[in-house]
Amino acid sequence: MGGLLLAAIGCGDDAAPAKPGDASKPDANKEVNSATGKGTPTVAAFTGAPLEIKASDKELLEAAKPEGKVLVYSTTDSASAKPLIADFNARYPEIKLEYQDLNSTDLFNKFTAETAAGTDTADVLWSSAMDQQMKMMQDGLGGSYQSPEADKLPQWAKYQEPGKTAWGTTLEPFAFVYNKKLLPADAVPKDHTALIKLLTDKTDLLKGKVTCYDPEKSGTGYLANSRDVTNFPAFWDLAAALGKADVKLYTSTGTMIEKIQSGEHIFGFNIIGSYILPKLKTDADTFGMVFPQDYTIGFSRVAFIAKKSKRPNSAKLFLDHLLSKRGQDILAKQSLLYPSRTDAEGEATASGLQKELGDKLKPIPVSNQVLDALDQTKRLAFVEKWQKALGRS
Amino acid sequence: MTDQTPVLTIESVEKSFGTTAVLQGVSVTLHEGEVVALLGASGSGKTTLLRVAGGLERPDAGRITIGSSVVFDASSAVDIPAEGRNLGFVFQSYALWPHMTVAANVGYGLRLRGASAADREARVLAVLERLGLGSLGSRYPHQLSGGQQQRVALARALVYEPPIVLLDEPLSNLDANLREEARAWLRELIVTLRLSALFVTHDQVEALAIADRVVLLNRGIVEQVGPPDSLYGDPKSLFAATFLGSNNVFPVTVDPTSRQSDGTAMVGCGPHRIRSHIRSSAGNTPASMAVIRLERVSVNPVLNMGTDWTTLELPLRTSLYLGERWEHVFDLHGHAFRAWGPRKLATGTHAVHLPVDGVWVF
Amino acid sequence: MMATIPSTLTQPWIRKRPFGRYAVVATVAILVLSPLLLIAYQSSLNGPFFAESSHFDTGAWRYVLGARQFWRAFGTSAIVATGMVGIGVPLGAVLAFIMVRTDIPGRRILEPAVLIPIFLSPIVTAFGYVVAIGPVGFISLWVKSLVGSVPWNVYGLPSLIVIAALTHVPHTYLYVSTALRSVNPELEEAARTLGAPPWRVALDISLPLVRPALLFSASLTFLLGFELFGLPLVLGDPAGLLVLTTYLFKLTTLLGVPSYQMMAVVALSIVVVTLPLVMIQRHLLGQASRFATIRGRGLALRPLKLGPWRWVALTIVVAWLLLTVAVPLGGILLRSVVKGWGEGVSLSRVLTLDHFRGLADYPNLIRGIVNTIALGVIGGAISVGCYLIVGLTQHRWSSRGVAVLDFMVLIPRAIPGLVGGLAFLWLILFIPALRPLRDSMIAVWMAYSTVWLAYGLRLISTALLQVGPELEEAAQTAGASPMRVRWEITIPLVRLGLIGSWLLIFMMFVREYSTGVYLFGAGTEVIGSLIVSLWGAGGLDLIAALSVVSVAIVSVALATALRLGVRLHD
């Protein structure tokens, strides 16, 4: 425990951030630094070779063993999380990982009620509803754990207040997605201004066939659109153009993807890129995705440990795992979730995005700033303005 | 035959369903070894009375005693339900349980009373054989004929030797030709087993044939009680007179000056005059009804009117051939007047004889 | 040989009040009213009831009742519900008459098929329609190639009403067909001899005789109209159509975090709709709220000969089956074996079994399916046992209690799943005695049983009504106590009704999700929760495959049961 405390105080990376494209190599920092208590897994772990556990990890593990399990509520579906879960189980066979995947509203409802009732509830919360996660932090439902792995996270992904910590584990972009067969390549807009032009010029083609999240009914949609407003002054023109094109609004990414695939819709605005990546592989003929060049908003799946967790050590173990290079690499390579860790390697990483988009990448920071999305007055005002712009009030 | 120990006493029972008063103060006593029929038209309350006795309906007022135990008393809130009255009850539809064999049906009452399996089997077999159903124990009800089902229902009610058996229209579901045989057979069985039985019927012949006493019910009230012959031969009311037998009923006016000490008087119907018995005070009013049973009417072979005012001269309307006899329909001042005879009659008027003691005026 | 046979007339007999029945009524009341009262309480607060800062506030009521959208959603729900009753109930009655009372050819195959929509999940059904007859659906594109355009729109109010009505026909069918089976065939034959064609017989004789079943079906269908969620979500949202449940869904996100109090208000508004429904139903049925049915078992069910009307009848049945079963199922089936679909996709090039492979790899799939089946079979059986107890309580009981039960059993069905699931979670969490139940499937089972009480009970009540009273009275007069009569006479005689109820409840449990959503844990997931989880993975691929699997399972169960001689009625 002492080592962890020191690690919490100590800071600063002592290894250079992994550059994207670097071949995976054994990290030079393999030796135990008892002051910082940091250990880094070897690549060999991927092949299933037994992992060397550092002394401080061992302490945590020993403390976690009597707890025996860790309960995670998450909005990441089981299939995407499967590689990570399998890896955790391989790494810590003594700790049973109970993973419940729920949609964000259900997660919020369940966790807050259980916490209020004092019954057994999740130890780790991992949700893409950033606003709800931060609200739970603010209401004191989240605890504090200065994970040694957190050092490798970019600044925007770190939320650290007295007694409260939360971590942005991914950075997933809101992209332009389109049906390749039905939208000619030269018409694909590069940025938001071009999008407005596209909608206005090609209204006949696109009428009733454009889709995006409904900010009224979808938390994700609202988050994205509220950031659109700050990043794009002409957003309300865009809204008007969407309205004229009879945009179809949904709450479910799955529905939107399905309809773009079938051609019922041709263009999707602010679709979450991590969902499309697998489709680009299996159905490359149909799906096309571009990141808007003027700015691309990214959201993050936020993770924190429950303050009243009955199994805090197991929780910490899991969180560490989630934030570790090993875990984040899995997210990048197998789950395709754009993990945020700066040295994560793989097909879909935040740093990769960073490289591609530079400062046009606008991550939603894991901070109290997100809470303004929960300001009811602001929300209702936005929604009203949105409806008006769409011409649907 | 009957010793006068009452086994079932029903006192002043009243029962209404909603706003309809079905029993309006009925009292009946069943004595040991006696067979009593509850006779009446539909709506007379007879079935309700039976069910009340059995504990299947709860009366609004009155008292019911079985043996020495009060099983129902409205005033002191005693109400022993059907399962506690230890009666046998035979339902009109037989109510045999379709999911149980004949033997299981019959043995049910014994099972409830804790008889051992061997004992049950023996008794069931005995009673089945008694009723001529010995080989049918393992069959199911739907495999039996109507007559057999009736006997199974009876067996079921009798096997545990209840002191009283209640039967609801026991023969009405049988085919007509079976019914006549069954009448005799049922009476014999009840008498031989020395049962006390109360049964409901709408069929007056059945009531007269099987019962030791008949209770005639009319709209919830006891009209008349008595042995069959007295009910048939000595009815106390117009209703009683006309309910039984085949009758000619016609309106008459009584000539009060002609009353004699033997209770007879002259009555007139149109131009006709006959002497008849005045049966009730109703006969004091000038307008009354006269009743004569068909079998008392005879047709004189010769048109001889006689002087004792017992013969009417009536034109013949039509004759019907019934097989064992002819039925002749005369015209009595516009009313149909029927008589039986062994042979066909010629058209025209005939002398129709009505014996004085056969004509009852109410 | 016994010396004497003991008499049952042994004094004293104690006059018993029906405590057992009262206890059952009380238990049902507690189960049914607890969620309702909790929701009502929540509606009058300004925050979650378990939050310390929450206090009494009429704000939620004022907001919702003052919101134009709420009233518009209410009106839309009412229109949909009315449409469903207007179209679905007559159609269901006609179907029931045709299948049960006539000599329509092919009855054996058609009858089970009529029940398929009952166990199809509504969201999956809706998507089936989109895939089949949506703007770029298989059938739509084919029609477009023939006539140049698609002459219908699967989104929007008219389609929603029609599809909702068609898919709810089986409910009416189930209750009306059960009732029709006990109609004396001579009543219909008399009409035939007077010259009435079959359709007149149906309209003038048979259907009026089954008035209670018709009224119940109409009430239930109307209520279900307010309960619709999956269909309006998929078919209504794209057209900007809002019904009460999707409005409720909106309220979970509108203000950022779910507003329980506003959701509670909306839920209560739906429950309030049931009140007049039940009252109207009881009023129309009159004092003798149950029609007596068959006496003895002698009346064989002789089917009406249809003659030339056969083909008309067959057309009606097949047309309904096509529209309601073949189209959406076909859509889902096709979707489960293609990689892509829609505009510009040539079907032959995209056939694949990948989705089924992907499904097989999905974590916890087998466990989920096993859990669902176990819940349906075992849980369903226990539920039916409980419903039997309630049914027996109402049986041969002339008391206000019967009316009270009749009203109460509909309430859980009236609470929309979104809110009902929350209510059950809260009850389990905050009532200490119930907490230990959460980790097992018992909590889920309790929630499911309560919600489907009205359905299961109705079938049992109908079966109980068919037991001639003399059969029970005969046992009574032989000396059997009321308990023995029930156990040895009544219950064996309604065996088939119980099995039918079990089958129906099994199908409902398989399809159910939202009621138990918060009560599942790792290890207790079911097909419904798997579908939602798959939804998060994006796209219909795996969901279509899973739906096909679950339909296959239920169909096999249904076919097996029918083969074994079980009939859903009689």
Image (tube, coloured by chain):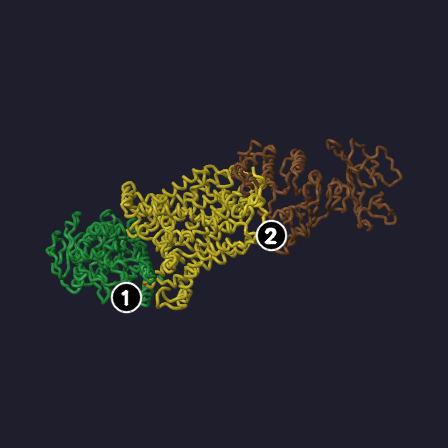
Query: Residue placed at 53% from the left, 45% from the top?
Result: C466
* Image spot of residue C491 (x, y percent): 50, 45
The x, y position of residue B256, in whole percent, is 86, 49
Question: Camera-side residue: B160 or A317?
Answer: B160
Q: Quadrant for residue A224, please give it.
A: bottom left
Answer yes or no: are tags 1 and 2 on the same subunit: no
- Identify the secondary structure beneath mark 1: helix
Circle 2 SS class: strand
Kindly indicate the quadrant of the structure image that contains residue B158: top right
Q: Kindly identify which residue carries mark 2.
A: B79
**Mark 1, mark 2: which one is toward the viewer?**
2
Query: Seen in the image, is B19 located left or right of residue C247?
Result: right
Query: Which color is chain A depicted in?
Result: green
State the brown chain: B
Residue C560 is left or right of residue C476, and the answer is left
Q: Amino acid at mark 1?
A: Gln
Residue A195 placement (x, y as % from top left): 25, 58
Q: Is residue C188 visible?
A: no
| Residue linked to disc 1 | A138
Color of chain C here? yellow
Q: Is residue C407 found left or right of B60 in the rendered image?
A: left
Marks 1 and 2: CB-CB under 8 Å? no
Counting from the top left corner in percent of width and height, residue A352 is at: 17, 56
Q: Which sits in the foreground, B276 or C552?
A: B276
Any part of residue C397 in sight: yes
Residue type beneath disc 2: Asp
Q: State whether residue B110 is above or below residue A84.
A: above
Which is nearer the eye, A27 or A302? A27
Pointer 2 chain? B
